Image (spheres, rainbow, N blue to C red):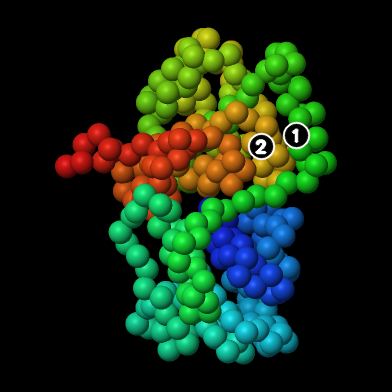
Amino acid sequence: MIGDVLASTIICQRLKNIYPNCIIHFVANRNTIAVLENNPNIDKLIIFEQKYRTSKLEFHKFLKSFRKTKYLAAIDAYGKLESNLITLFTEAEIKISHPKWYTKWIYTHTVKENLDPSNDIPLAFQNRLNLINPISSKLASEVLFPKIYLRADEIEKAQASLTTISNGTRQQFIMISILGSGRNKTYPAQYMAEVLDLVCTNTEARLIFNYIPNQKDDVLEIYNKCNRETKSQIAIDFYAESLRDFLAVLSQCIMLIGNEGGAVNMAKALEIPTFCMFSPFILKGAWHNDNSQQHVGVHLKDYAPE
């Protein structure tokens, strides 16, 4: 998932802070590279293509390609079969991941995951940073968060596209993460409509929905439950052409509101204020800490701990 990939970039950031001259290769699925482009802490992107999942021959060729580079360390932040095999095929002196009884033989070092949230840093970030402990002991006090790096031309393009839905030169925009990554991560339609109505009674900002065209029916279910004034403030048919374009548009918004998920993590990485609703089955402390006044997350447990 894009949020997981973005979270893992803090490993690169910390390694560069400790070893400024190190060379870092980052393996990621093609659909996630938008959050990695232009990142100064990544020297080379290695793309995991869909064909490696459908063809054992192509996957084997891909795995063998890792033997062409002499790596000092391979850090597996994913811990699934594909990354297990990639780590296995590298000839790295140090191989690090979280411990699992059936794969621990692949790694020279395993780092136990912390499952107890603290207020300093979300668990998703803390556990990734801990993977560097076998390489260096210079890590104790450093707190890092993911960052997304946009180019000036990308920002200019986003600003130009937003003028097409602007009601004036001082128009403000709010990004709405209208749907979660699945129904079990999506705030119910009636409740979300009430949130949007409340937002629109307190601001004249234009609301931009974050969704893809094949989700239009689910989005319209929420839109149709909103009152007339709220509907007039929603740019229902405004789309970014790509994920990178979406990031540039998001960077021009005054905040993001909606379902917790990848878009929220992207907003945080762009230093855009966020307000998000967590699905009850998600551990809030894994992705959010309450110390920041710029980012607010709400969870059922906040209101009904039992």
Mark 2 or mark 1, which has the lower sequence index?
1
Say if residue 226 shows up in the picture.
no
Mark linked to residue 158: 1
Amino acid type at mark 2: Ser
Q: Position of residue 60 (x, y in %)?
A: 64, 83
Check disc 1: other Cα within 10 Å, few if <14, some if 14-19, many if 20+.
some
Q: Quick check: 285 left or right of 165? A: left
Label 2 and label 1: CA atoms lie apart by: 9 Å
| Element marked by disc 2 | loop
Q: Which residue is drawn at 33% across and 55% down?
A: 117
Q: Quick check: 280 left or right of 187? A: left
Q: In this view, does 128 lie above or below 269?
A: below
Quarter of image, res 268 = top right
Amino acid type at mark 1: Ala
Residue tagged 2: 251
Q: Position of residue 200 (x, y in %)?
A: 51, 16
Number of numbered tags placed on the structure image: 2
